[in-house]
Image: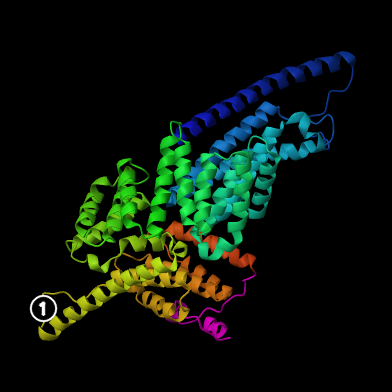
């Protein structure tokens, strides 16, 4: 619905600009003809060609500018492209990121045209352009720079080839100025700032919470002074409260946001978005039954990805003792809910859910003791930093128990092979399951602040066995992320940057661009903090991929 509205509005603005061009050409023709006739009759010299006329200074009263209506149409056209790009960014797929970048480029072309006109007008801009159009340009250019600065490096490089170079600080400056001027785009500028603070911090809370949490709360409180019952601001109040580790207030804010839109045009989308966020809060607090119920409802409402919501319902039920049968029934419904696009392609969420369920079904759900699907999701979504120590300890026990089950099964399989020659039982092959569990354990220990020495052992096992993974290849770059976090926790930013840059070298794995955004944000912050010292590349490839942190050990002992 939103995309249709944006496309329609874009078409109207484009038609207005085309009509203005036709009118301009006709009027220019008659104006030129009239001046030519008048010049011949008076015997004066015809005016010089525009191509050789010196451009008047910006403050010249003879400077000609497009009408305010034309400039506003450019802003509306650009805003449609910008908002379309934001919607595409939320889809988190390779193609959607590319489309997002192209739409941002289209938006910037129109915004930049109006911005140049605004600068040329100088102090007299109020004569040619209304304040709301100026507000629209500030919002647009600021948003484009801010969104571009958060895009994955791979997409960013492709856009830079086309002449793009995002300036995050310029984006912040323009959006803040737009918000402070209290014109028509002020609320949108505030929403964009809140969205960036919430999204950036959610991607990398271990790295960016300290930087953005306070400023996000200040921006939100200022906005709620003018719009205390805004559903959008209440939604972001929920997101920011989670970042501030106040999960009770976060859930209350989401409930209030959904309540404020009842019997309104935005009731369903806002209620669904809030239900999803509350489901995450239930998972973070270990309320698995309520989380499963929320995902079940979202699946019925066909929110986002029904297949993924059904998978998450099963994952949450799996965490409840005695609910494995119900979890298996939920998992079994996932394949029928997967939506295939043109050419048989699937969305990233659907592909991940289907891949995991197929792994469960391969052994007839007999190996469920070797998986922790709900904790795997919390690890990928980087939600462990929001957990309290008690819940982290419970998750740690779940992972340790699953690792013990794998060890027992492997011992039984080795015992059979020690007694029989070429037995029918295949050799142990639990590399994928063990790697995922070790990554989850390392992530939990990072969030709990447990010594990095043990994490180094866990993560090195993943890196050392990277060639043995049949399906869950995503664990290697995610392991490098966790290794970088461990280094960051002991103030070894240069080592963190090196490990994160190493993670960027991997490709074609589940949630690649989710991690790429996280890495881009973390690397940018590391550079801002002055961590730019190069680390020598080891000649031995195995040593190159080692996540051992000798410098960390030195700093810890010091």
Q: Give 392 or 62, whichever is nearer the viewer.
A: 392
The residue at 83%/25% (across/down) is: 47
Residue 541 sits inside the magenta stretch: yes
**In the displayed structure, would residue 111 be above or below residue 430?**
above
- Left or right position of 37 against 101: right
Residue 209 percent coordinates (x, y): 56, 61
Quarter of the figure that contains the N terminus: top left
**In the displayed structure, would residue 485 be above or below residue 67?**
below
The residue at 49%/29% (across/down) is: 8
**In the displayed structure, would residue 301 be above or below residue 308?**
above
- Left or right position of 196 against 114: left
Q: Give 308 or 101, whichever is nearer the viewer.
A: 308
Residue 113 percent coordinates (x, y): 67, 38
**How many other residues sit within 10 Å of disc 1, few (<14), some (14-19) or many (≥20)?**
few
- The quadrant in which residue 475 appears is bottom left
- Left or right position of 474 against 524: left
Can the viewer see residue 335? yes
Which residue matches tag 1? Answer: 423
Can the viewer see residue 161? no
Residue 495 percent coordinates (x, y): 54, 75
Residue 547 percent coordinates (x, y): 46, 77
In the image, which residues are magenta? 530-558
For the image, the number of numbered tags is 1
The residue at 29%/50% (across/down) is: 310
């Amino acid at each position: 619905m939103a995309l249709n509205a944006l496309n329609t509005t874009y078409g109207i603005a484009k038609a207005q600009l085309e009509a203005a061009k036709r009118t301009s050409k006709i009027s220019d023709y008659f104006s030129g003809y009239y001046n030519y006739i008048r010049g011949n009759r008076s015997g004066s010299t015809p005016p010089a060609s525009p191509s050789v006329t010196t451009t008047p200074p910006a403050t010249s009263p003879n400077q000609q500018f497009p009408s305010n209506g034309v400039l506003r149409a450019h802003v509306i056209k650009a805003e449609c492209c910008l908002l379309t790009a934001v919607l595409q960014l939320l889809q988190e797929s390779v193609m959607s990121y590319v489309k997002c970048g192209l739409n941002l480029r289209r938006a910037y072309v129109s915004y930049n045209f109006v911005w140049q006109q605004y600068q040329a007008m100088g102090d007299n801009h109020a004569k040619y352009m209304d304040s709301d159009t100026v507000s629209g340009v500030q919002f647009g250019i600021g948003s484009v720079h801010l969104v571009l600065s958060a895009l994955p490096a791979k997409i960013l490089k492709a856009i830079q080839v086309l002449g793009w170079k995002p300036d995050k600080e310029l984006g912040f400056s323009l959006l803040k100025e737009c918000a402070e001027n209290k014109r028509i785009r002020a609320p949108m500028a505030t929403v964009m700032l809140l969205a960036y603070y919430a999204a950036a911090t959610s991607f990398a809370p271990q790295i960016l919470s300290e930087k953005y949490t306070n400023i996000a709360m200040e921006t939100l409180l200022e906005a709620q002074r003018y719009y205390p019952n805004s559903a959008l601001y209440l939604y972001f109040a929920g997101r920011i409260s989670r970042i501030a580790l106040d999960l009770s207030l976060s859930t209350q804010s989401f409930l209030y946001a959904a309540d404020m839109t009842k019997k309104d045009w935005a009731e369903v989308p806002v209620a669904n978005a809030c239900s999803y966020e509350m489901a995450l809060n239930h998972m973070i607090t270990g309320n698995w039954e309520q989380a499963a119920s929320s995902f079940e409802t979202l699946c019925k409402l066909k929110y986002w990805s029904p297949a993924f919501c059904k998978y998450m319902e099963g994952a949450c039920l799996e965490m409840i003792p005695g609910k494995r049968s119900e979890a298996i029934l939920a998992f079994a419904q996932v394949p029928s809910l997967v939506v295939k696009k043109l050419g048989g392609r699937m969305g990233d969420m659907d592909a991940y859910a289907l891949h995991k369920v197929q792994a469960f079904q391969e052994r007839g759900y007999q190996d469920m003791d070797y998986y922790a699907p709900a904790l795997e999701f919390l690890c990928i979504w980087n939600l462990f930093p929001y957990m309290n120590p008690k819940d982290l300890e419970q998750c740690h026990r779940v992972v340790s128990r699953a690792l013990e089950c794998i060890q027992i099964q492997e011992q039984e399989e080795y015992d059979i092979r020690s007694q029989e020659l070429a037995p029918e039982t295949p050799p142990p092959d639990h590399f994928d399951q063990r790697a995922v569990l070790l990554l989850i354990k390392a992530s939990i220990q990072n969030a709990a602040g447990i010594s990095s020495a043990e994490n180094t052992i866990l993560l090195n096992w993943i890196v050392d066995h990277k060639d043995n993974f049949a399906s869950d290849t995503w664990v290697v770059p995610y392991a490098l992320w966790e290794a970088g976090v461990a280094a960051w926790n002991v103030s070894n930013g240069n080592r963190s940057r090196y490990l994160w840059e190493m993670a960027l070298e991997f490709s074609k794995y589940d949630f690649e661009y989710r991690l790429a955004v996280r890495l881009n944000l973390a690397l940018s912050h590391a550079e801002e903090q002055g961590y730019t010292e190069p680390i020598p590349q080891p000649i031995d490839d195995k040593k190159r991929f080692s996540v051992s942190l000798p410098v960390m050990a030195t700093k810890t002992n010091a």
